[in-house]
Image (cartoon, rainbow, N blue to C red):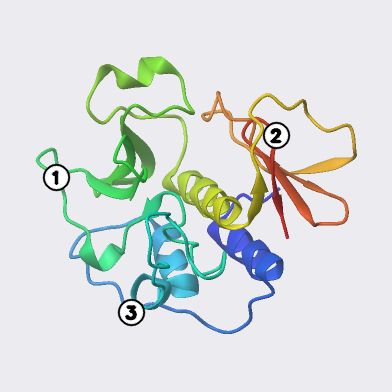
Amino acid sequence: MRKTVDEACDFVAEWCQQKGSYAGKTLSAGFAVPDSIVRLNARTGHLWHSAKRVPGPRLQYATPFLGLLGGQDQILDPNGYAPDKNGIVPFVWENQGVWGYGFDPDAVDQLLITGDWCDGRREYFETEWPRVPAKPEGALVCTLLINLCMQSDANWDDNAPKPETMLSVLWQHPAWSDFDGFWINDARTLIYFRGWQVARR
């Protein structure tokens, strides 16, 4: 199971058959940021400046790898971070702004959420930036994988049953209580996720 940003980036590179370095610019936020964001920037940060969407109404990139930071939900460029009125720094926004992930620079290992977060328990909406029992790293791994899947060749069937073939857990987390996680087949050609939708290599 992939638990870290580095493991997720290694998997994405293998899935996309992508080699080379895509390190971003040196971070200069002026406040503490989670180490997982620093490592993500070191692995893929160049994409914040080089990856462009395909023209048209669809949220589409030329390849799944190029859509890694924005192919479904937007992982924000840390060099543009700014605390909001509560002192919280958003680092991921859902593509329509329905929910977001954030962190407090004074407690960078605690994941905070805002908005109508569909993957967790409804009680999390009681305050503006409630804590959830997870770290920002878990949110980044989940977002990287959902962006990869949404930019890959996917079949959509929210009512499909869990496949009976042998699968291995790619990622799951108890804080995402309404999300089954990501699973991969033994041939490493299919990713199953959310309602057993399928992304093909």
Q: Looking at the picture, which amino acid does disc 2 mark? A: Trp
Most distant residue in the front direction: 56
Residue at the (41%, 29%) spot, across then down: 132
Q: Nearer the viewer, mark 2 or mark 3?
A: 2
Residue 148 as seen in the image, left or right of residue 196:
left
Q: Please report whichever mark, 2 or 3, sits nearer to the chain's N-terminal start.
A: 3
Whether 23 is drawn above or below 201: the answer is below
Residue 125 location (% of width, % of height): 31, 20
How far apart marks 1 and 2 lie (CA) works out to 36 Å
Residue occupied by mark 2: 196
Residue 89 as seen in the image, left or right of residue 182:
left
Instruction: Indicate the quadrant where residue 192 lies.
Output: top right
Residue at the (77%, 51%) spot, across then down: 190
Dot 3, how many residues are within 10 Å of its Cα: few (below 14), some (14-19), or many (20+)?
Answer: some
Q: In this view of the protein, which residue sits in the foreground, 12 or 79? A: 12
Q: Please report whichever mark, 1 or 2, sits nearer to the chain's N-terminal start.
A: 1
The kind of secondary structure element at disc 3 is: loop
How far apart marks 2 and 3 lie (CA) works out to 37 Å
Whether 85 is drawn above or below 36: the answer is above
Q: Looking at the picture, which amino acid does disc 3 mark? A: Lys
Residue occupied by mark 1: 84
Residue occupied by mark 3: 25
Tell whether label 1 touches label 3 (CB within 8 Å).
Answer: no
Instruction: Indicate the quadrant where residue 99 lies.
Output: top left
Whether 1 is drawn above or below 6: the answer is above
The kind of secondary structure element at disc 1 is: loop
The kind of secondary structure element at disc 2 is: loop
Residue 87 location (% of width, % of height): 15, 43
Q: Looking at the picture, which amino acid does disc 1 mark? A: Asp
Most distant residue in the bottom direction: 20
Residue 163 location (% of width, % of height): 83, 33
